[in-house]
Image (spheres, grey):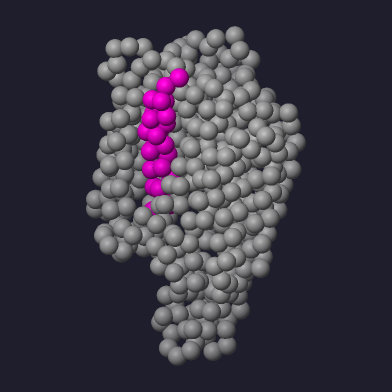
């Protein structure tokens, strides 16, 4: 039996092991998914708020990019380190500390007085955010030792992640139509207050009883490597490959190479690289990375399509994207049962195939297409992704010792961040490359068309400044070109998702949910 230490919630006089059957574990799960819901919302609301805070803070174009990106950069760079730290000091302690910090920084971000302050607070929010996701999933691993209960709990966890991502635009759109841009950050406060108040009483503490030291050089190498690599990919996608981007990419690869080498030599590594020798673990992580990579092109540009091509308000765009969340929530709750009745590889490969085929249906998308096509695509994408992500999360938790649950969960989240960065870079380049290739419409000045080619938002502004029918012609041309780019991006994503389905079918062969790792079997 594992010797991992567990303890009662703060203030309890009786030892309560999370293995005890109790309804309180489900209340504890409800507390954990509050953090997940919040992170999902926070990821999406900033994109809606960007035009409003731009008017107030007047950031330069470079500062605006950093406001949007620094949060995800820091989270990506710190996930593995924070997951490992939770294994050492206690996942409950890390979660509650990070929650308090996240709430305080949300207030500072809401009342940021300058672009520079906004960048600093968003970066620090990334530090706090990196403590939340690995801690929640690792605590689920320890609160629910029964494989079937854990599968259902992971399904709820995944469903709330999807719900947060979908609810974000709806909540954000409502707040931005009625209040100032800072309100989208203040919604974090009541959620965090409930999480800390209830979580301090109900969540059991868990940690690795023999963790070894937290190796600071490894922390630095992982952070430098991942942040440099993600930054290089995003910069190359936005501005092309320059010498400084190439140098940054080399620094990132070198940092990750040095990190791996150091982990293999340390007696108690920050991340045990032997986890990747387990075919199920590696297959689940790769499936997550490729799935997000393939979906990013559609997800990143879809809001622009709804608002600037089809003329919806931010709130209407958020509501239009809800079928993906509904499908993901339902599939997440049923995923464990589906995987047990069929097979793990069948559930994951089937889900990814469904997503790939749904993306392929976007090849028929037009600027004036009715909602039936996109609504159906989003529903199938939600069902397929919810099924695949929930099962892979369960596989990742099931194939590692409880002592390493935090670090393993962080690997899964890091794959998500890397996949998003690579997807936006690669598929984003496809979409923008096609968009910028449109010919100058008859009667439209070449200078106006050149401005419009910078982005669809720029095309909308440029069209407003043109007199007569030329503005309408330019805007329709830009919208058609953007839609064509979205079709190409979705097509490329479909190929990636179908390839991921084949890879998952091979690597997850023989994998079952609840498989006990050798280290846990004693």
Q: Is residue 508 above or below residue 289?
A: above
Residue numbers of the magenta segment: 21-46
- Residue 431's quadrant in the figure? bottom right
- Residue 408's quadrant in the figure? top right
Measured as percent of width and height from the top left, residue 56 is found at 27, 61
- Residue 176's quadrant in the figure? bottom left
Q: Is residue 263 visible?
A: no
Residue at the image point whose x is 49% and y is 46% from the top: 162
Q: Is residue 22 visible?
A: yes
Measured as percent of width and height from the top left, residue 113 is found at 24, 53
Q: Is residue 95 above or below residue 6?
A: below
The overriding secondary structure of the stretch rendered in magenta is helix
Pick the front one: 396 or 417: 396
Could you tell whether 274 is left or right of 13 in the image? right
Image quadrant in which the C terminus is located: top right
Residue at the image point whose x is 30% and y is 48% from the top: 187
Instruction: Report if residue 36 lies within the magenta region.
Output: yes
Residue at the image point whose x is 69% and y is 49% from the top: 353
Pick the front one: 450 or 419: 419
């Amino acid at each position: 039996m594992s010797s991992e230490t567990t303890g009662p919630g703060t203030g309890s006089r009786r030892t309560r092991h999370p293995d005890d059957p109790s309804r309180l574990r489900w209340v504890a799960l409800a507390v954990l998914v509050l953090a997940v819901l919040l992170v999902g919302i926070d990821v999406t609301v900033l994109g809606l708020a960007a035009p409003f805070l731009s008017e107030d803070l007047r950031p330069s174009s470079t500062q605006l990019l950093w406001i949007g990106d620094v949060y995800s950069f820091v989270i990506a760079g710190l996930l593995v380190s924070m997951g490992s730290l939770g294994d050492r000091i206690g996942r409950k302690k890390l979660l509650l500390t990070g929650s308090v910090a996240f709430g305080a920084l949300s207030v500072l971000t809401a009342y940021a007085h300058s672009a520079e302050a906004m960048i600093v607070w968003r970066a620090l929010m990334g530090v706090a955010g990196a403590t939340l996701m690995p801690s929640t999933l690792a605590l689920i691993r320890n609160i629910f030792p029964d494989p079937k209960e854990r599968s259902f709990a992971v399904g709820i966890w995944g469903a709330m992640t999807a719900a947060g991502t979908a609810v974000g635009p709806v909540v954000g759109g409502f707040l931005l139509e009625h209040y100032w841009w800072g309100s989208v950050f203040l919604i974090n406060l009541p959620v965090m207050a409930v999480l800390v108040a209830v979580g301090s009483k109900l969540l059991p503490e868990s940690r690795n009883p023999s963790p070894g030291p937290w190796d600071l050089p490894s922390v630095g190498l992982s952070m430098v490597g991942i942040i440099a690599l993600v930054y290089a990919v995003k910069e190359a996608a936005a501005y092309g490959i320059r010498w400084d981007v190439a140098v940054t990419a080399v620094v990132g690869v070198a940092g990750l190479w040095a990190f791996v080498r150091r982990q293999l030599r340390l007696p108690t590594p920050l991340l045990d690289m032997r986890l990747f020798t387990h075919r199920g673990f590696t297959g689940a992580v790769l499936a997550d990375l490729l799935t997000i990579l393939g979906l990013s092109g559609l997800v990143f540009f879809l809001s622009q399509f709804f608002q600037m091509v089809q003329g919806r308000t931010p709130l209407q765009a958020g509501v239009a994207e809800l079928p993906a969340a509904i499908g993901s929530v339902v599939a997440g709750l049923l995923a464990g049962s589906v995987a047990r009745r069929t097979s793990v590889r069948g559930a994951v490969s089937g889900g990814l195939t469904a997503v790939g085929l749904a993306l392929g249906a976007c090849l028929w998308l037009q600027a004036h297409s009715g909602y039936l096509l996109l609504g159906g695509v989003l529903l199938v994408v939600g069902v397929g992704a919810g099924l695949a992500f929930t099962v892979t999360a369960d596989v990742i938790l099931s194939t590692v010792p409880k002592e390493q649950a935090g670090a393993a969960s962080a690997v899964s989240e890091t794959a998500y961040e890397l996949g998003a960065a690579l997807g936006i870079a690669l598929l984003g380049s496809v979409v923008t490359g096609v968009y910028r290739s449109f010919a100058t419409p008859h009667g439209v000045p070449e200078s106006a068309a050149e401005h419009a080619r910078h982005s669809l938002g720029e095309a909308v502004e440029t069209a407003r400044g043109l007199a007569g029918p030329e503005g309408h012609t330019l805007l329709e041309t830009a919208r058609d070109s953007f839609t064509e780019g979205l079709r190409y991006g979705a097509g490329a994503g479909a190929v990636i998702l179908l390839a991921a389905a084949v890879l998952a079918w091979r690597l997850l062969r023989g994998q079952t949910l609840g498989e006990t790792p050798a280290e846990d079997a004693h």
